[in-house]
Image: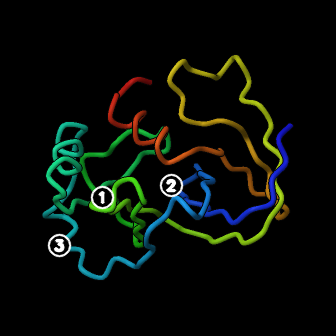
Amino acid sequence: MNKNLNDYILLRVENTRLLLLQEQMLRIAHIHDRHQVDNTIASNAEVLTSGIADGKPLFAALSETLTLLPHIPEGRYVQTTWQITPEIHWCWSEVRLLNQISIVKQPIPVSVRTPHMPVDGIVTLSDGTVALSCDSSNLLQYIISGEQ
């Protein structure tokens, strides 16, 4: 078990919750202009990769299984940008800041682990919320590769 005391951010996609270090985030904001979002979507890995390479601002959303969606679902009203890809605005159902918390990562069971899975553990927070611990770089590589 790996125990840490740090600042984290909890990102929710419907019933899936991801736990990342806050230092990996650049910005958190509400989505105010839905029309702008709908016209600048990274609808697939190729568009996402091109947007990153060109520095073109794009919006992106993940499914519960961490695949890139071709649209931004209703109910995604919070966006984050990551240090590694400041041009991509990731859209979430909910974002929570968790300051100076201690976590214990439980290993991912072998029966559900995939070779390219970006998740490095399962965390149960003090309020009972279960989240998947991951790193933004690993998550981005997983999304771009399309390997499930």
Q: How many marks?
A: 3
Could you tell whether 67 is left or right of 53 in the image?
A: right
Q: Quadrant of the C terminus?
A: top left
Under tag 3, what secondary structure?
A: helix
Who's the residue at 20% across and 56% down the image?
A: 41
How far from the left and from the top, in percent, is residue 59? 27, 60
Who's the residue at 45% across and 62% down the image?
A: 92
Q: Earlier in the sequence, mark 2 or mark 3?
A: 2
Query: What residue is pinned by disc 2?
Result: 13
Q: Earlier in the sequence, mark 1 or mark 3?
A: 3
Q: Which quadrant would residue 30 be assigned to in this image?
A: bottom left
Q: CA distance from mark 1 to mark 3?
A: 13 Å
The three-letter amino acid code for the residue at tag 1 is Ile
Residue 139 to residue 36: above or below: above
Could you tell whether 61 is left or right of 115 in the image?
A: left
Q: Nearer the viewer, residue 24 or 32?
A: 24
Query: What residue is pinned by disc 1?
Result: 88
Count neighbours of disc 1 (C-alpha within 10 A) and say few if under 14, some if 14 to 19, many if 20 or more: many
Query: What residue is pinned by disc 3?
Result: 36
